Image (cartoon, rainbow, N blue to C red):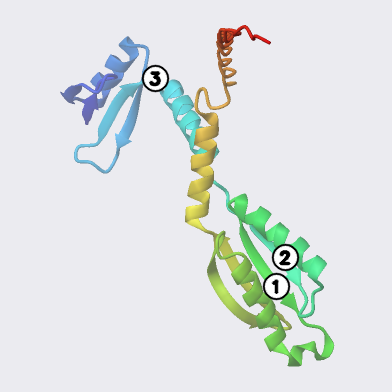
């Protein structure tokens, strides 16, 4: 077998007994890292520490993963304006959270004969969400429902990330110093009084 030391140094091809003895001298384990190699490669290491480090890396990777959820909003072919605005607000919320939105129009009774109304509702949603979303699945029928799937617009998400970075930057929220007071205006000297004109004596 080919043995590798704890610092990655090559120890050469050794009998397994010799490699085990070397690992025991260092108080470590002999771990097979490339069983398919010819000859197989084993490394001398602290296996417990290795497992702990690997688990820590996996946990850090999971924290950085963004879990995208698919959330649904249901509408009717003749949804009232107030209800429509409430549902649009929900879709905006889902997209800003980096989730996808399934927008479903439900048909009841004879409404199924007016599919164009459902298409009109979904087209209105597309127009209202054009700055925030991209169409991942175009409108289509599924039983008595017509649905589409909207995904967050990557440009919108990038703007959100940029704004978050700017808000978190040092000094971004530091209070600004008050503006310096303007200097008081200098007093204006009063104009000098003009000398009185001489009065000529009059004779009678």
Q: Is residue 91 above or below residue 127?
A: above
Choose the circle earlier in sequence order: 2 or 3.
Answer: 3
Q: Are marks 1 and 3 in contact (CB under 8 Å)?
A: no
Q: Is residue 27 left or right of residue 131?
A: left
Q: Is residue 50 left or right of residue 165?
A: left
Q: Is residue 100 above or below residue 171?
A: below
Q: Which mark is residue 91?
A: none
Q: What residue do we see at 70% from left, 88% from top?
A: 115
Q: Is residue 105 above or below residue 98?
A: below
Q: Are marks 2 and 3 in contact (CB under 8 Å)?
A: no
Residue under numbered circle 1: 104
> Spatial distance from mark 2 to mark 3, Cα to Cα?
53 Å
Residue 166: x %, y % from top left:
50, 34
Quadrant for the C terminus in the image: top right
Q: Secondary structure at mark 1?
A: strand
Label 3 neighbourhood size at 10 Å, few (<14), some (14-19), many (20+)? some
Residue 168: x %, y % from top left:
54, 30
Image quadrant in which you'd find residue 196: top right
Q: What residue do we see at 57% from left, 14% from top?
A: 185
Residue under numbered circle 2: 73
Q: What residue do we see at 46% from left, 32% from top?
A: 57
> Spatial distance from mark 1 to mark 3, Cα to Cα?
56 Å
> Spatial distance from mark 1 to mark 2, Cα to Cα?
6 Å
Quadrant for the N terminus in the image: top left
Q: Secondary structure at mark 2?
A: strand
Q: Is residue 42 left or right of residue 154?
A: left
Residue under numbered circle 3: 46
Q: Secondary structure at mark 3?
A: loop
Foreground residue among 21 and 82: 82
Label 2 neighbourhood size at 10 Å, few (<14), some (14-19), many (20+)? some
Q: Are marks 1 and 2 in contact (CB under 8 Å)?
A: yes
């Amino acid at each position: 077998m080919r043995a590798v030391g704890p610092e990655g140094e090559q120890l050469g091809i050794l009998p397994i007994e010799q490699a085990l003895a070397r690992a025991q001298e260092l108080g470590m384990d002999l771990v097979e890292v490339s069983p398919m190699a010819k000859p197989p490669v084993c490394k001398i290491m602290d296996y417990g520490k290795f497992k702990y480090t690997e688990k820590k890396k996996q946990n850090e990777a999971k924290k950085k993963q963004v879990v995208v959820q698919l959330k649904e909003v249901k509408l009717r072919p003749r949804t009232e304006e107030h209800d429509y605005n409430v549902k649009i607000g929900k879709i905006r919320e889902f997209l800003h959270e980096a989730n996808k939105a399934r927008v479903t129009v439900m048909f009841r009774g004879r409404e199924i004969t007016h599919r164009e109304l459902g298409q009109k509702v979904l087209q209105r949603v597309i127009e209202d969400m054009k700055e925030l979303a991209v169409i991942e699945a175009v409108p289509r029928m599924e039983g008595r429902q017509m649905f589409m799937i909207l995904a967050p617009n990557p440009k919108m998400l990038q703007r959100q990330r940029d704004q978050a970075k700017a808000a978190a930057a040092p000094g971004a929220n530091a209070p600004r110093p008050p503006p310096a007071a303007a200097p008081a205006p200098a007093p204006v000297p009063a104009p000098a009084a003009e000398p009185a004109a001489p009065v000529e004596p009059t004779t009678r």
